[in-house]
């Protein structure tokens, strides 16, 4: 009811703005009130849906058949291809990467060079 009332108020504010009896700020305020009422309506609808689901869940009525949902089809998510008969995800064992460009520097017994 609030949404339809604010829709009518916005239409009236726009008409009055065309005739010069309302400012653009009045029209924008009316539009904001309409948007807030639409947000409140969606929030209330969400709360109702959650409450219905929690009630059904507490009664044990949350199976696919009870919720009138279609069973999931085959998954479209494909995981990594692992080698068969392997106990780990390392296909050929761990890869060793040679590190080059390092050198050691001899430090005299006194500490600093």
Image (cartoon, grey):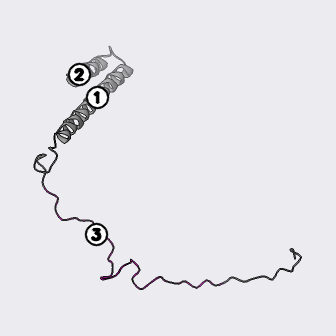
Q: CA distance from mark 1 to mark 3?
A: 40 Å
Tags 1 and 2 touching, CB below 8 Å: yes
What is the magenta range? 71-100
Q: Which residue is mark 1?
A: 40
Q: Residue at x 86, y 80 (%)?
A: 108
SS for tag 2? helix
Vertical comparison of 70 with 52: above or below: below
Work out whether mark 1 precedes mark 2 in sequence or the reverse, and give the earlier one.
2
Q: Which mark is residue 78?
A: 3
- How many discs appear? 3
Q: CA distance from mark 2 to mark 3?
A: 47 Å
Q: Which quarter of the rendered picture does the C terminus lie within?
A: bottom right
Q: Nearer the viewer, mark 2 or mark 3?
A: 3
Q: Which quarter of the rendered picture does the N terminus lie within?
A: top left
Q: Which mark is residue 95?
A: none
Q: Which residue is mark 2?
A: 2
Work out whether mark 2 precedes mark 3 in sequence or the reverse, and give the earlier one.
2
Count neighbours of disc 2 (C-alpha within 10 A) and say few if under 14, some if 14 to 19, many if 20 or more: some
Q: Nearer the viewer, residue 78 or 83?
A: 83
Location of residue 99 (image quadrant):
bottom right
* Left or right placement of residue 97 versus residue 91 in this view: right
Which residue sits furthest right? 110
Q: Residue at x 81, y 83 (%)?
A: 106
Q: Nearer the viewer, residue 40 or 73?
A: 73
């Amino acid at each position: 009811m609030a949404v339809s009332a604010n829709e009518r108020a916005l239409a009236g504010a726009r008409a009055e703005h065309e005739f010069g009896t309302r400012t653009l700020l009045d029209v924008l305020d009316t539009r904001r009130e309409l948007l807030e009422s639409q947000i409140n309506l969606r929030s209330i609808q969400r709360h109702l849906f959650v409450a219905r689901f929690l009630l059904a869940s507490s009664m044990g009525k949350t199976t696919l058949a009870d919720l009138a949902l279609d069973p999931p089809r085959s998954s479209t998510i494909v995981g990594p291809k692992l080698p068969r008969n392997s106990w780990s995800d390392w296909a050929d064992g761990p890869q060793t990467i040679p590190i080059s460009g390092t050198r050691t520097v001899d430090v005299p017994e006194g500490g600093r060079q």
